[in-house]
Structures are given as C-alpha cells and as structure tokens.
Image (tube, rainbow, N blue to C red):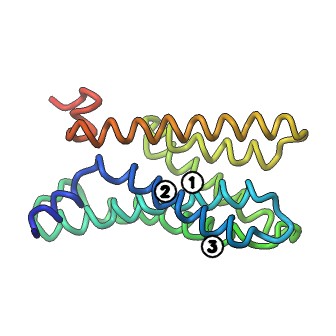
Amino acid sequence: MADWLIESILADGHWLALAMVVGAGAVALRVFRRPGVGQRPANVALDTFYGCMIGVMASGHLLAVTVKMLLGSLEGSPWLLYPLGLVLLVPSIGLVAGAAGDGQSLALWRRPVALNLWLGISLLAMGLHNWILAAPAALNLAYRFSPRPGVARAVLVAILVGYTALFVGSLVFLASGQSFEQFRGIEP
C-alpha cells in the first residue's frame, strides 16, 4: 500500500487530471451555491478553477519534493525546489480565496488581476514549456477586460475549449504511464 501511494505521489501524470477535477468541483461548490456579489459568475468560476488547478499542482510538486527528499532520491536543491512550488501555491490560494469577493471594490478588483498575472508570468519564467498552464491566466484577464459581451463570450468559449483539450490531454498522459520527459520524448 505504501509503495503504491509513493508511486502515485511521484507520478507526474496524475496531478493535472486530479487538479482539473478538484477545480471543477470547487467551481460547482462556489458558483452554483453562492456566486460573488457584484461580479459576473464567470469571473468567479474562472478564478476559482485556475487557482485550484495550479494550487493542486503546486501542492503535488511540494509533496513530491518532500517524499523524494525523505527517500534520498531528490535531484536538485530543496532550497530551489520548495520556493518554486510556493511561488505558485501562495497566489493560487489567494486567487481562490478572493474569487468570491465583492467585484465592485477597487482593491478586490485588482487582486485577481495581479494574481492571474503573477501565476502566468511565474509559470512562463519557469520555462516556456509551461505556456499551456500560463495561457488560462491570460484568457482570464482577457475575459475580465473584454469590452463587449460578444468578445467576452468568444473568450469564454476559447477557455472552455482549451480546458477541455487540456483535460483530454491529461487523461492521455495519465493513461500512457510515462513520465513527462518520456511522454515528450526528451529523456535520453
């Protein structure tokens, strides 16, 4: 049992699908029970989903680093690997926590914008291969600042199609049983 749990924690193929399921559950609980006062429900849903998705993946990263360190198989410095996870986890928590606030307050309006920017830029700074996880931050902002309802609907459709494709891709990756490097064909 313990071996299976350790393998599951260390298998990078599990985290994205799990993160997206958790994000969808959080959206269902938050938006459908009580949307944010003064905000479009889609803003609340987008921020909640993205914050949960990145937060779960960052938590998985931190858990995997801890397990590898305890097993003595950690490649890299924990002084670098822990801050990488925290740089994503902290704003993710803030994005989820602030998603249901009053959208009319200027301070609460700026916060999700800043946190989406932080997450998107941080992911890109960690490598251009993370663009697929950074793109939703840009789309969340595009939706928030869309000048017309037709543009907002088009951005929302792009977000939903993108998340669907990402979820299907995560399931294909999960089913492959390979590591990220093996799946991408970059492992020697």
Viewer-nearest residue: 158 or 98:
158
The amino acid marked with disc number 3 is Ala
Using residue 7 as the reference point, say whether residue 31 is left or right of it. right
In the image, residue 148 lies at what x, y percent?
90, 39
Where is residue 71 drawn, in percent x and y?
10, 66
Instruction: Give above or below for 10 relative to 145.
Output: below
Q: From this view, report whether residue 49 is shown above or below residue 177.
A: below
Q: Tag 1: Cα neighbours inside 10 Å, few (<14), some, or many (≥20)?
A: many
Identify the residue position indicated by label 3 in the image: 97
Of 121 and 143, nearer the camera is: 143
Question: In which image quadrant can residue 119 be found?
Answer: bottom right
Task: Tell me the distance, in whole angstroms, between the alpha carbons under discs 2 and 3.
Answer: 14 Å
Lower position in the chain sequence, tag 1 or tag 2: 2
Residue 69 located left or right of residue 171: left
Q: Nearer the viewer, mark 1 or mark 2?
A: 2
Q: Which residue is mark 2?
A: 54
Question: Which marked residue is nearer to the observer: mark 3 or mark 1?
Answer: 3
Where is residue 46? Give x, y as percent: 66, 54
